[in-house]
Image (spheres, coloured by chain):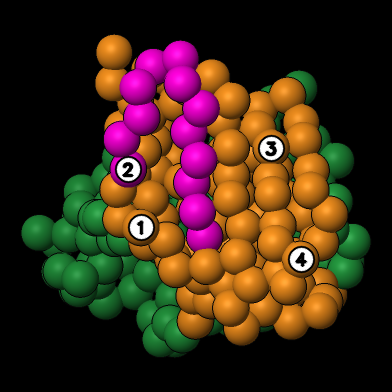
Chain colours: A orange, B green
Amino acid sequence: DAKTTQPPSMDCAEGRAANLPCNHSTISGNEYVYWYRQIHSQGPQYIIHGLKNNETNEMASLIITEDRKSSTLILPHATLRDTAVYYCIVRVADNFNKFYFGSGTKLNVKP
Amino acid sequence: DAGVTQSPTHLIKTRGQQVTLRCSPKSGHDTVSWYQQALGQGPQFIFQYYEEEERQRGNFPDRFSGHQFPNYSSELNVNALLLGDSALYLCASSLAPTILAKNIQYFGAGTRLSVL
């Protein structure tokens, strides 16, 4: 049921920006893009979400393409603590708040 | 403010046994969803409870059942355990089901179930 495609792994140098891509080419007009991350065997942690406009919060920025078929999560200054599996999720804006997770991207931040 | 809490943190069972996992939602939340996460995979939606009723269900057999109590806490029950039920079971809480994008799900740390 996952509607997203992500690379299985990425490396990033500490202090540099980490850009995590996500493809959601079948997204519908009423579907939101959410990003969560999961640090080894803990529960997933909410990062950010958006519909069609770019979004920024204290953790990250979310860039959604104009056609909404892909998005990029940007961690501006990655630290070792950002090493985790990052999930891009498409959520239908219905009355049921369930998420379909894919396999995610393992981000390895290296010193 | 306590977040989502789950108990126990770890559990070991044998095939054929039954297990009950527990979840207390984040303060102010009234909706609980359960997910199963096998090793190396993303979480898979099991079901969601709101107003003490199962509102949505993923592709899981009837061996998986649940309950929600008046205080919004929830239980996940799995009968006739199989080896393949070994996984991390995650509970997530949120506000009442709504189309609003701000209805963020908050996850607990999970219960690690091992079936031998």
Q: Residue at x 50, y 40 (%)?
A: A19
Residue B106 in sight from this viewpoint:
no
Query: A33 or B18: which is nearer to us?
Result: A33
Instruction: Give the residue at mark 3.
Output: A61
N-terminal-most mark, 4 or 1: 1
Identify the magenta region: A10-22
Instruction: Give the residue at mark 2.
Output: A10
Instruction: Give the residue at mark 1.
Output: A7
Give the Cα distance between marks 4 and 1: 21 Å
Tag 3 secondary structure: strand
Tag 4 secondary structure: loop
Residue type at the position of mark 1: Pro
Which quadrant of the rendered structure holds the C terminus of chain B? bottom left
Residue A66: which numbered mark, if any? 4
**Residue B26 is a magenta residue:** no
Residue type at the position of mark 2: Met
N-terminal-most mark, 2 or 4: 2
Discs 3 and 4 share one subunit: yes
| In this rendering, the label closer to the viewer, 4 or 1 | 4
N-terminal-most mark, 1 or 3: 1
Indicate the position of residue B18 as horizontal and vertical percent values.
31, 66
Q: Circles 1 and 2: CB distance less than 8 Å? A: yes
Indicate the position of residue A35 as horizontal and vertical percent values.
60, 49
The chain holding disc 1 is A
Q: Circles 3 and 4: CB distance less than 8 Å? A: no
